[in-house]
Image (cartoon, coloured by chain):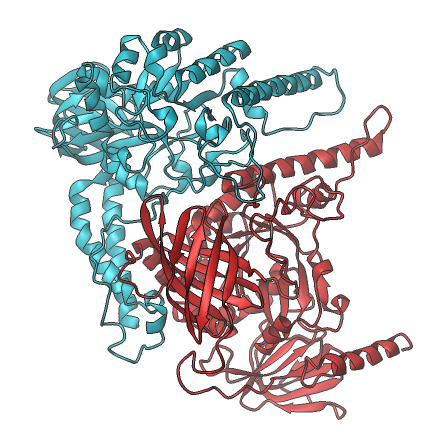
Amino acid sequence: MKNHLKAILIGISLLALLCGSALAQNTGETLIKNATVLTAARGTLENTDVLISNGKIARIGKNLRAPNAVVIDATGKYLVPGIIDCHSHAMLDAINEGSLAVTSMVRTRDVLDPTDMTIYRALAGGVTTLNLLHGSANPIGGQNTVVKLKWGHPLEDYVFENAPPGIKFALGENVKRSNFTPQPGQSRRYPATRMGTMEVIRDAFVRARDYKKKWDDFRAGRTKVPPRRDIELEPLVEVLEGKRLVHAHGYRSDEHLNLMLIADEFGFKVATLQHGLEAYKIAPEIAKFGTGVSIFVDYWGYKLEAYDTIPYNAYILWKNGVVVSINSDSGERIRRLNLDAAKTMKYGGVPEEEALKMITLNPAKQLGVDKWTGSIEVGKDADVAIWSGHPFSPFSYVEETLVDGEVLFDRAKDIARRSELKAERERLEKLEANLPPNKRGKKDDKKGGKDENPEATPDPSKGGNKR
Amino acid sequence: MNKQFPRVVLAVLCFFAFAFAINAQVGSYAITNAKIVTVSGAVIENGTVVIRNGLIESVGAGVKAPSDAKIFDGKGMTVYPGLFDADTSLGIPSQPAGAPGGGGQRGQTAGDDSNSNYADGLRPETMAASKLKAGDSQISAHRNAGFTTALTVDNSGIFNGQSAVINLAGDSVSEMIIRSPFAQHVTFTTLRGSYPGSLLGTFAALRQMFLDAKRHDELLKMYAKDPRGMKRPGADASLEALIPVVNGEQPVVFTANTEREIIRALDLAKEFKLKALISGGQESWKVADRLKADNIAVLLSLDFPKRTLSESKDAEPETLETLRLRAEVPKNPARLKAAGVRFAFHSGELKNMKDYFANAREAVENGLSEGDAVRAMTLTAAEILGVDNTLGSIEKGKIANLVLVKGGLLDKDASVAYVFVDGKEFEQPKKPEKPAGGANAGGAAPRVAGTWNLTIDVPGQSVASTLTLEQSAQTLTGTLSSDMFPATPIRDGKTTPTGFTFSVTVNVGGSDIPVAFDGRVTGNEVEGTIDTPQGPVAFRGTRVP
C-alpha cells in the first residue's frame, strides 16, 4: 500500500513538472519563426515570423529578433488563426431547459464543465474559441457563453469577458416537438406548430416591452413600488436594446425570414441564423437584414426539415455578401472544421482566404469578438495554431495550439506523455478503491490484484465526454 | 417535580412499548478507569466521568464516583464525546417516489396546504423538525455505532428545507431537537416534468426566488412603514422562509461534491451574499483556498468513492480521472486541514457505519491526525452547527452525550460498548453470529421479482424506465426498457442481501452503453446506483403491485 502511494505521488509530481513547463511559456515572449502565415485578414505571408508578447500578437515580419523569447521553429509549417466554433455544446453539464417555451432566464455560464475532454480534442483540431449555446428545445432558449479553451485553467478563465452576451432562439421541428413523444400522463408543451412558435416569440417581446416600461416608469418616479425583477424578461429587454445577440437555430427559409421580420418589427437584428440549411434561398434578404449565417457545409437529411439544402449554400451566401461561418454542433466534427472550410472551395469555388475566414474571422464577427481574435494581426490575442501543412489538406495536423500566447496543446508532448499516463493508469488500477468489488478486501492475497487486469490499453485522452 | 412525573411515566411506558433500547434509564453514572478524550482539552489517560440528570457533572483524573452512581468500569476503554453525523436524513421518512409519468402530481400544487406560490421542490419553508419521527430504526442503528447527534433534513427537492440538529434518542421529537432550524439546504437537482427540468433551470429558479425573497422583504418593510396607497404584498410561505437566507442570517448548506459544483455554490452565495456551507465536498481540496478565504466550512462526506462496477469485458476502461479521484479523495481531509478549512464529517450515502470508520482510518493513513479526525466527528461539528456550547466535548455542564469504545475509536478492531445520549445509557445489542461462507450464503434471498417502474437521474434530466425481473433463488432474469431504448435482456442478475444487481447493455441513439445496476429493495421501493461509462447515476422506483 505504501509503495503504491509513493509511486502515485511520483507520478503526480512528474505530471505537475510537465504541466509546469508548459505553463512557463506563458510568462515571457514566444517567437514563431519562419512560418507560412495564413492571416485570415491580409492574405498569406511566406517565411514570416510572429512575435507573441503578453498573450498578444506583438509583431509580424521577417527575421524578427527577441532574445528572451521561447522560439518555435515553424519552417515548412503553417501558422493559422485559432478556429472559432460558432455553435457548440461542449463543456455543458446541461444543454436544454425544455420544460417551458421561453427559458431566457437560464444561462449556460452556470453549468460549465472545464474538465470536458472535448475541450482538449478541440484544441488538438486547432480550435481556440467556442460559442456555447443552449439547445433547441424551445422558441426562446437560454443565454450562451463565449469561451476560450483555456485547458487546465480555472473555470472563470474560460469565459471570453469581452464577448457581448447572447441568447439562443430556435424554430421548427425541435421546438414544436415533432420528434418528441411525451411520457404517459405528460402533456404536450405549447407550441406544437410553426405559427405557435412565432406567436410565442412575439408574445415574449410584447411582455419584455411592457416590463421595460414598468421599470422606466419606476425609474422616472412615476410609480412608488419597485417592479419585480424578472430574469426571464431582462435578457429580452437587452435584445430589444441591441445589447444581446440572438443566435437563431432553424432550417427552413420561411421560418428564418419570418423571424427576421419579427425582429425588424421589434427593432432589433438577429445576429446569426444557425444551421440555415435553406439560407441560400433567401441570401439577398439575409444580406439586407445584416444577419450572419452559421452552417454545416455538407450535412443534411437527418430529419424532414433538413432535406432541402445544397453544398453550395456557403458559396451563395458569401456571393451575396452574407457573413458566413461553419460550425460543428458536435464534439467530434469540432476537431476537423478545417476540412469543412476546405469543402467550400470545392463547392462553388469560395476563394481560399474567404474559406478560412468561415472558421476564423467570420465567426469572430458573428460573436462580436473580431476585435480580439479570429485573425493573425498585430494587437490581437495570440490565439493561433501551428499546422504541419496547409490546414485544408487532409494530411495536415495540428502540432501546437496557443491560446492567449500559451501553448495548451502540444502534439509532441502529448505523444511523449502517453507512456506516463499508461503507467499511471496501471498503478491506479491496482489501488484498493479502484478494484472491482469482488476483488477488494483481499489485500493479503498476493494474487488478488494481479490476475485479470483489464487488458485494454486505454486511450490516454479518453475522458468524460458527455454526449 | 409535578411536571416531571407524568413525563417519566410516559418515558417508562414508551420504553416498554417500543423496546428500542436494550437498557435505558436516566440517572447518575460514573465511568471509571477509562481513557478520556475530552477533545476540548488534554487527553486524560485514566480518569472518571460522572453523569447526572443528563449532564456531565464532573470529569477528571482525580474525580471520585459518587456513591449513588451506577459504575462502568472503563478499563481498556476510551470515552469520547458522542459522535456527530453532520448531514443526514435520519428520522425523516423517505417520500414515496412518485410513479414515473404519474400525471403531473409534482406540479404546481402538489397536494400541499401551503400558501406558497412556488412548485413542490422549491419550498424552503419545509421544516425537518416537523417531518421528524422519533424511534426510527435507522436512528438506533446510528446510535449503536457511536453517533449521538445528527444534522438532519429531508433530501428531496432543490430547496430541501430547513434542517435540525437532533439527539439520536428521545421518546418524542421535542426531546430530540437541539436546534431548529439550523440552515436552509439546497441540492442542485431538477424537478420532474416541470420547470426547472435541467441544471440550467435549477440555477435560474434559485436566482429568481432569491430575488423575489429580497423584494418581498423590501415590500413588507415598505408596507409596515406606510401601507396607504400601496398594494398589500401577498403572503407567501416560501418567500418568507427565504428572507433570513437572503439577509445572511440563516446559513445555506449546498450539497456540492465536484470542484465545479462547489464553485457554482460559492458563486451563487457570493452573488446573493449568502452564508454558505458545503456538504459532500468530495473535491473540496481543489477549492480549499477559496473556502478558506471566504471562511466557508465543509460538511465532509466520508463516503469515499470506490469502484462499484464489476469486471466486464464489454465495458470500456474507467477514465483516468475516475481512477485518480478515488486515489485523491482520502487525502482530502488532511489537505483541508493544512489549508485551514474547517470541516466536520458526515456519512453521506454510506449504509454501513463500519465503512465510515474504515474511511476515517484511511483519511488518517493519508495524513490527517487522529485527533483532528475525532475533532471532525465531535467538537468541530458542534462548532459548525452552532451547538458547541452544550455538545462536542467532554466538559463539566455539557450534555452527557458520550460513547464508550473498547480500544480507540479509529482502531481497526474498535467496538462501541456503551452510548449515552442526554445521560441515558444504551447498551450495545448483541451481534448475531455471522454465518460462515460467502456474502450471499446467510439468509434467504430477498424477493425482488416483479415489474418495477424506475426513474433514472441522468445528469440534467430524469428518465423513466421499466424493469421486469423474474427470480429463481438468487438468480435473476428479465428485461429493462424505456422510451430511449428498446426492451433489453439483463445479464448476470442476482440478488444481494439487500436487493439486486445486474448488468445490461442498452442501445441509445445507435451506441451500446454497458451499465450495471445495484439496487436496495425495501418492500416495494427500490433505490440504488447505476454504473455507467460516464460515472454513477442514481435510480429509484416502485414495484407495480
Q: Quadrant of residue B80?
A: bottom right
Residue at 43% in and 23% down: A247
Q: Quadrant of residue B248?
A: top right
Q: Quadrant of the N terminus of chain B?
A: bottom right
Q: Residue at x 50, y 26 (%)?
A: A139
On the image, the x and y values in percent for residue A170 come to 46, 25
Q: Is A445 drawn above or below residue B459 in the view shown?
A: below
Which residue is the extreme one toward the left? A76
Q: Against A309, is B185 above or below?
A: below
- Report the residue at 39% width, 16% height from top: A253
Horizontal and vertical percent for residue A163? 41, 24
Quadrant of the image for the C terminus of chain B?
A: bottom right
Q: Which one is nearer the viewer's eye here, A104 or B283?
A: A104
Chain B's shade in the image?
Answer: red
| Residue A43 visible in image | yes
User: Of all residues shown, which one is farthest toward the right?
Assistant: B2
Question: Residue at position x 55%, y 22% from top?
Answer: A196
Q: Is residue B337 visible?
A: no
Q: Position of residue B450 (x, y in %)?
A: 51, 64
Counting every numbered tag in the picture gives 0
Chain rendered cyan: A
Left or right, residue B130 beside residue B366: right
The residue nearer to you, when weighing B445 against B137, is B445
- Horizontal side, residue B321 vs residue A312: left or right: right
Residue A80 placement, left or right of A189? left
Q: In the rendering, at what x and y percent does residue B481 appear? A: 44, 53
Q: Is residue B434 left or right of residue B16?
A: left
Camera-nearest residue between A221 and B478: B478
